[in-house]
Each structure stands twice: as C-alpha cells, then as structure tokens.
Amino acid sequence: MSEDYTRALVETLREAFEREGLDRWIAYAPSRVPLRVRPTVFTSPDELDNLIFNGFCVQNLAGYLKHHPEGRVGVLVKGCDRRAINVLIQEKQVSRENLFLAGIPCPGMLSRTRLLEEFPGLQSDQVEESGETVTVRTPDGPRTLSRDDMLLPTCRSCHHRIPEDVELLLGPPPFAAPEAEMDFSAEVGPIGEMPRNQRAALFADELSRCILCYACRNICPLCYCDTCFTDVNQPAWMTPALEPGNIFFYHVNRMMHMAGRCVACGSCEWVCPEHIPLRLLYGKITADVAELFSYEAGLDATLPQPLSHFSEDDPDEHIG
Amino acid sequence: MTRTNTSDSRFLLRDDLTAFLSALSERCELWIPQAVGEGVRFLPYREEALLNLDQTPPDHPAKSILFPNTETLFRYERTEDGAITLIPQETTNQPLALFGARSCDIRAFDALDAVFLKRSAPDTSYRQRRNRLVIIGFGCLDPAATCFCERMGGGPFDEAGMDIQMIPLPEGYLFRTLTDRGKALIAPLASFFKEADPVTASQAEALRRKGAPHPDGAAVDFAALKAAVEAGREEPFWESLAAVCLGCGICTFACPVCSCFSLVDEGALKGGRRIRHWDACMFSVFTREASGHNPRGAAVDRVKQRFFHKFFYSLENGEPPGCVGCGRCVTQCPTCIDIREVIDHFQPGEG
Ligand code: SF4
Ligand code: SF4
Ligand code: SF4
Ligand code: SF4
C-alpha cells in the first residue's frame, strides 16, 4: 500500500516539476541510516524516482531555502514547513512567487528515539506504517504499535498539520495519527508555573549536556543570520568554552530571537544529539506570545509580527 | 610499550565489577563510559555514575580523555605594577585509566598522537595525559549496523593500543593483560580476580579470533582511495552532499579522530586564561580570516575538506587515515551524510 502511495506521489511531483519548469525540488530520499531519511535537493525530474515520504521526514525543509535561493524551487511541505515559509516571507527572506509548494497533509512524525529505545538496533526496513499503526518486524514476529504512541513530542500538540496556501495540495498518506488532542501552551504551562529556582534547575540540568555543536541553530529554518551572535568576536558576546555560562547565554539568546517566530516544528529538538528538549525549554516564549498577542507564528504571511512591528496604540505596559 | 611475554588472563565476575572499579578509582584517575541523559560519554569515575558498557560504540568518543572539548592551557595574572605571572596547567603523575573504550576509539589515538605528538612540537598538555594513560579496552560482542571498523583495518576485538583487553563473557569479563603497564595497574587488585578456567579462556579465545560476524564490505585500500578522492576533487558528488549539509558540529564532535581546535584568550585587566576548544571544519567561521575573507567560504569546500583530511591529507602527511569506522558520524548526522557512501563512491565494487 505504501509503495503505491510513494509511486503516485513521485508521479504527481514529477509532473509538477516538468510542467512548472522548476529548477529544483526539495524533499526527502531514503538512506541506509536507521530511521533517518536524507533531505535532498533534486535537480531534475528524473531524480525524483528516489523520493520518499514517511514518518521519519521530520526535518523542516524551509531552512534550505536560504541555501538555495536562486531560481524557482519546489518544496514538499508539511504543516510546519509551510508555516516556517510564512515567517520567511514576512521577514522578506524568500519571495512567494519563486516557490512552488506541494503540501502534504502531515500524518504526524515518528520518534526515532522512542522506537530505538523500544527496539534497539532497529532498521528502517523493519518499520511498516499503515493507518493508525506502526508495525515493527522483530525476530520474534511483528509487533504493532499505535502511531499516536510513537509520535514525536512536537507532533502531539500540533494543530496545523494541513499546509495552507499551497500550489498543490496532495492527498493524505495512507498512514496518519489521529488529530492531536494536546495543546502546546498546556504542555509548557507547568514549566512556566514552576518556582523560579526549580525552573532554573531544570534548565541547568537539561542544558548541562549541550556540546555547542549548533545543530539546533543550523537546522532551524528561522535562524538564517549570516553571522550569528555566537560567532561575533568583536565584541565577543560569549566565548566558545564549553561551560554553563556560555551554554546558557547561547540558548537564552536564541530563545529570545525566536519569540513570535518559532513555529514549534521541533526540528531543533529532533536534531539535538544530546536529546535536550529544546522545544519545551523554548516553548514558554511561544506560549507567552500566544497569550500576550493572541498570535501564533506562521499562520498568515500577511500579518505583522508582534515583536518587530510598531503600533501607536501599543499599551506599552512594560514601560514605567 | 613493553608487551608482556606470557599471556596473562584473569577472570572478573560480573557482580564484582562495581567493587573493582571503585577500588581502581582509588589508585588512579579513572574514566568510565557513563549514561548521561540518553547518551553515553566517557567521564571521570564517580561512585553514583551509571556505568554503561552496552552502547556499541558509546555515542561520545573516548578522545575527550586526551583532548577535552574545552581546556585551560594556562592562566595569567597581572599585578598593579604591570608584571604578568603565567600559571601553567596543573600536572600530576597519577596514572590516567581509560576503562571500557572500544577498539575503534583506541585506534583513533594513533591519529591523535600523530597530530599532537609527532609533528614539529609536541603538545605538552596532550603529552602529559598521553604519558599517564593506561587503557582497559572492551571487545564488542554486538557491533552496530553502522560499525565498519573491519573495513578500516580494525575489528571488534582488535587489541592494538590496549594495555588490557576485556572480553565480555556470560558470567563476567576476561581481562587479557597485554603490557607491563596494564599489569602494574591491576596487580594490586589481584584479589578481585580468579584464574580463568580453560573453558572460559577458550570461549574468549574463540570470540576474539572470530571477531563478531560483521560482513560490511571489503577492507579499504587506502592508497587507492586516496588516489580516487584526489582524482574526484571536482566531481558533482560533493555538491550533492553539500546541498543538504547543515554545517553543524555533530559529525566532527562525534568523531574519535577529528582533532581540529581553536585557541581563545579570555582576558581582563587583572588576568585571564588561554583556552583550547574543539572546533569543526564544518563550521563556516572555522576558516574565516580577520579580513573577512574565507578560503572555504562555500559549503562544498567544507564538506570536501572533511573527507579530504580523512582520506587524502592525513595519508599524504604519512599519518593514519582519518577514519576508524566507528559509524558515529553515520548515525548522528541529521542529513544522512554517510562516510561509507563516500568510500563506496570512490572505491566502487567493494561496498
Ligand atoms: S526554534 Fe526550533 S521549533 Fe522553533 S522554528 Fe526553529 S527549529 Fe522549529
Ligand atoms: S543541538 Fe543540542 S548539543 Fe547541539 S548546540 Fe543545540 S542544544 Fe547544544
Ligand atoms: S555532515 Fe551532517 S553532522 Fe556533519 S556538519 Fe553536515 S549535517 Fe552536520
Ligand atoms: S569519520 Fe565517522 S565513522 Fe570515521 S571515525 Fe570519524 S565518526 Fe567514526
């Protein structure tokens, strides 16, 4: 069933690639690495034979638009990729007319970590996704799990799986988790309510594992600065010493830079080799923006952004 | 390093391992693989640390025992009259014991030695740790699907560089003492061990000879690979990798061989320090010059550099190849840039 789905998907996208005369297409291809797919920039319609879509296509592809700005680009977008593109449009980093977006109603991505915990040494070809289940072939026979239980944390509270304003809305994949019931603000709520020292301890504990590899920054579709504050040395805002002060400084700054911009795609959390729950740690800011400005990032590219927009009737409550 | 003449094997029961490590920690600076968060890293022994010998290989390399992610090379103080005093790094003669490292990580020390000891001026900070190092290596019963040490000239039970090799068996561990240094380390702890009975010894020997079944392709011919990589310098293949590489530090930080670092002076009027920290050829700022010019300004230059260093420059300089096949960069690269595919691309038909 999923092979038929992939074949149909490839043909639809190939047809669009040719018809629209695109220069490239950004999507995913299989890889030999367990439970990972390879983000891929396809440069001709023929190469699309190698395209796949499954529950491991977590990485937000919008980030690649900054690396491949020339020409007309097709992108396979889930809900969160699409929302990140809206933020890039608001911030004038991409032009909508250069993009051809094929939207895929997102089935909810799978947690590689959970699966590997449950099945050490698991390989991609042992995993079969269908309907609301994930079946894993083990040496002791198949085991069927509920997709919902294996979802990536970020997808458990995502209410925007269907990408909007796309050139081509694809049919839903033959596998999907039921609609999310959790709410992101509710998820991060307890962190906000913690006593200050307890919250500080949580941050210190989780961030103590950070190795400053900057994968979280580099994968983030919205961290596109040519020179990040981490790399400025005149003045040096921080030093590269792997010490708690620098680690905190890095994350607190990135966190503030994401206010009203983060689309909670979870790519940073997913990419972190130290499994630091970044989306949660950063989430309070997103929840605050939602509460203070009734604003959720990436839903509408025509709206002004709460923190980069001056409005004369701003109550300025924080002043004086 | 002096090899012992007689093969000296003793047996440690699984249940005695904790007490053994605790006793060993009193005699040396001991580092063990510990579960930290969801990963495993080599860190100094603590009573409450969670020893983990199951992750093959541990997702953090053992290189940090010799080449820490961040270290202070020296401090300085400046008095009111302007005199500057240098305060060197503290040193000790205490043995530095690395427990439970896999053969890939230990073979990688050859490559680190080549960089830090064998070039024009030996690195004093590295050298003082290297001289103190005693290695209790650990055989891999269960190589990961992404391990390819055999192709790179090693193997799950390769004992090169170890002072003692531990072989995991059902009831405990066989300790094969390979050098005088290893012998001296555990001699005072003789009471923890029993003589290996012939059955245990032959079980261990069988494991060691056979290695674990691991049919991941033929051994790499490094000279041929070097030539092929050089001839393929301009191939579009590199562009396909660079198109998606994030330029993060995951692959190089996870690599037991990668040794790029930067030096930074952190100073104030009254004093300061010079630190050395891991850097990465994959970071775009790694080669940015003060003028703003960047000789490796494009992602493709950086991706090439990583593999050229491993398979071309190292060999050109008469140093060991830059990869021991631990597979960490393979499993950890978020974009599936797979060094095995690089090897197979340039040595077709052998993968
Ligand atoms: S900060 Fe993290 S969750 Fe937010 S947009 Fe960036 S990668 Fe996605
Ligand atoms: S990805 Fe993880 S380890 Fe790397 S810098 Fe970000 S938080 Fe730190
Ligand atoms: S190869 Fe992979 S791990 Fe290395 S810098 Fe590129 S994306 Fe990061
Ligand atoms: S290059 Fe990759 S596989 Fe080779 S030693 Fe380094 S981390 Fe291991």
Image (tube, coloured by chain):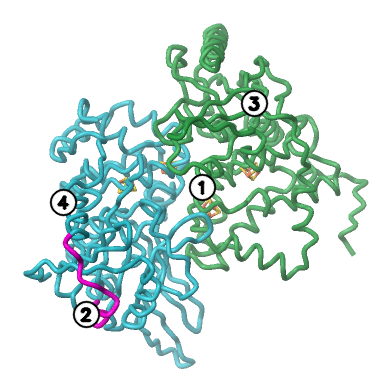
Chain colours: A green, B cyan
Per the image, the residue denoted by label 2 is B187
Q: State the residue at coordinates (26%, 40%).
A: B214
Q: Is residue A126 left or right of residue B218?
A: right
Q: Residue B275's image quarter?
A: bottom left
Residue that label 3 marks: A95
From the image, tell me which residue sits under label 4. Answer: B317
Give how far apart the Cα atoms at labels 3 and 4 are.
Answer: 48 Å
Q: Secondary structure at mark 2?
A: helix
Label 3–label 1 contact, CB within 8 A: no
> Closer to the camera: disc 4 or disc 1?
1
Segment colored magenta: B185-198
Helix or strand or loop: what does disc 3 sit on?
Answer: loop
C-alpha span from label 2 to label 1: 45 Å
Q: Nearer the viewer, residue A162 or B317?
A: A162
Say if residue A319 shows up in the picture.
yes
Q: Chain of mark 2?
A: B
Residues at marks 3 and 4 on the same chain? no
Q: Position of residue A22 (x, y in %)?
A: 53, 14
Give the structural element (helix, strand or loop) at label 1. helix
**Could you tell which of marks 2 and 4 lies nearer the N-terminus?**
2
Mark 2 vs mark 1: in front: 2
Give the CA distance from mark 2 to mark 4: 40 Å
Describe the element under mark 4 as helix, strand or loop. Answer: loop
- Image disc number at residue B269: none
